[in-house]
Amino acid sequence: MKNIKYYISIICGLLLSTLLFANDITISAQLDTNQMRIGEQQNISLAIEYNSDKTLIIPDFGKELTHNIFLVDTFSFQSTEDKDKSIRKAKLPITCFDAGEYSFEIGPFIYDSDTIWSSPLQLSVQTVELDTTGVIKPIKPIRVPEYTFKDYLPKILTVVAIILVFALIAFVIWYVLKHKKPKFLPKKAVAKEKADIKALRELEQLKSQNLCEKDEYKNYYTILTDILREYFGDVLAIDTFEKTSDEIIQEVVASGKVPLSVIQNLQIILKEADFVKFAKHKPTVETGNLHYGLSLFCINESKHLIEKEEVRDTQN
């Protein structure tokens, strides 16, 4: 009787220690599904709750988690603390390549000095059904999707938008170039007509007007003296239009460049012009022609001054 009581006390002690231990750590494991086909993948949700005062050693899982059950990727545990409890969770990605019924546990975990396994898992791995009839089925034609205008509309709008953008850029460039004020452009050098050539041309034009024959002597001598004033003003670089006839002669003499014969004939022409314009003197046609000839003489006999000036400019 005493032996029976002894064994009963031992059994009760073991049960009590097991319950206390079970309350100290919990390792739960759960599959996403209990059925899968060969080569498919799923996860095992693993949760461990234990006393934070104790030490838990997690095994180093290899590629093969258990017989024919393989890990397909690495994983890591997420840890949280709740008062005196530690909670660690992870998802183990697995696959299987052999059909069959599998019953397995996750572990072993070392908890202090004890070895612990997870709750058992049941997994049914099925083969992929193959068509073994041997009947070759005809190849189905490629199905071309039917497109509607709505399917093409985004692409059409994109192309139109791109075209409009480029058109706008081109217009802006054209507008700016068209309305852009040109920078300073050097004026084309216009060859200035030589003073003697210009004077001779104007004298020829005066002669063609036949003013003396028309009894327009005042107009004739005004144009004649203006031609001479401009000519000698250009040749000697003096202001002849603001000076009297006597002042012009003085300027010509003071230049020291003009021959005496030219000065004398120029003085004759200017005095005759003053008589006609201011004293209402009326010369003859012959006198007008004479003074025309003297004007030609003055220009032809003094044009060497222009040639000397051109040579000096070339040397400079």
Image: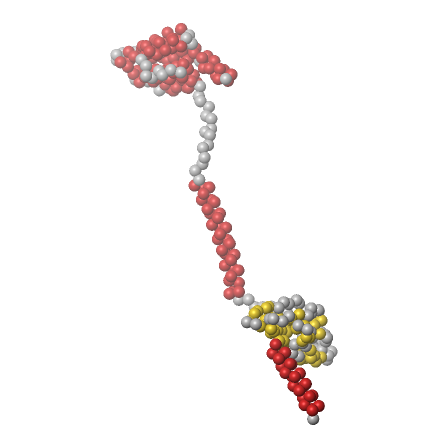
Q: Is residue 1 above or below residue 245?
A: below
Residue drawn at x 67%, y 76% is: 117
- Which residue is depicted at the point 45% across and 15% down? 306
Depth check: 146 or 301 in front? 146
Can residue 307 be seen?
no
Residue 179 appearing in the image: yes
Q: Quadrant of the N terminus?
A: bottom right
Q: Nearer the viewer, residue 159 or 87?
A: 87
Pick the residue in front: 76 or 312. Answer: 76
Q: Is residue 137 left or right of residue 217?
A: right
In screen coordinates, is 283 left or right of 236?
Answer: left
Residue 213 drawn at (x, y percent): 32, 16
Q: Position of residue 205 (x, y in %)?
A: 38, 20
Q: How is the image coloured?
A: secondary structure
Q: How many marks?
A: 0
Q: Looking at this rendering, what residue extends furthest in the left direction?
A: 279
Q: Residue at x 51, y 16 (%)?
A: 315
205 horizontally vs 57: left or right: left
Q: Is residue 109 above or below residue 195?
A: below
Q: Which residue is situated farthest in the front direction here? A: 2
Q: Which of the 4 image quadrants contains residue 291?
A: top left
Place of residue 22 in the rendered image (x, y in percent of width and height, measured from the top left):
62, 79
Residue shown at 48%/48% (left/top)? Answer: 169
Q: Residue 247 is drawn in which quadrant?
A: top left
Instruction: Estimate the x, y position of residue 61 in percent, counting from the top left.
Output: 69, 69
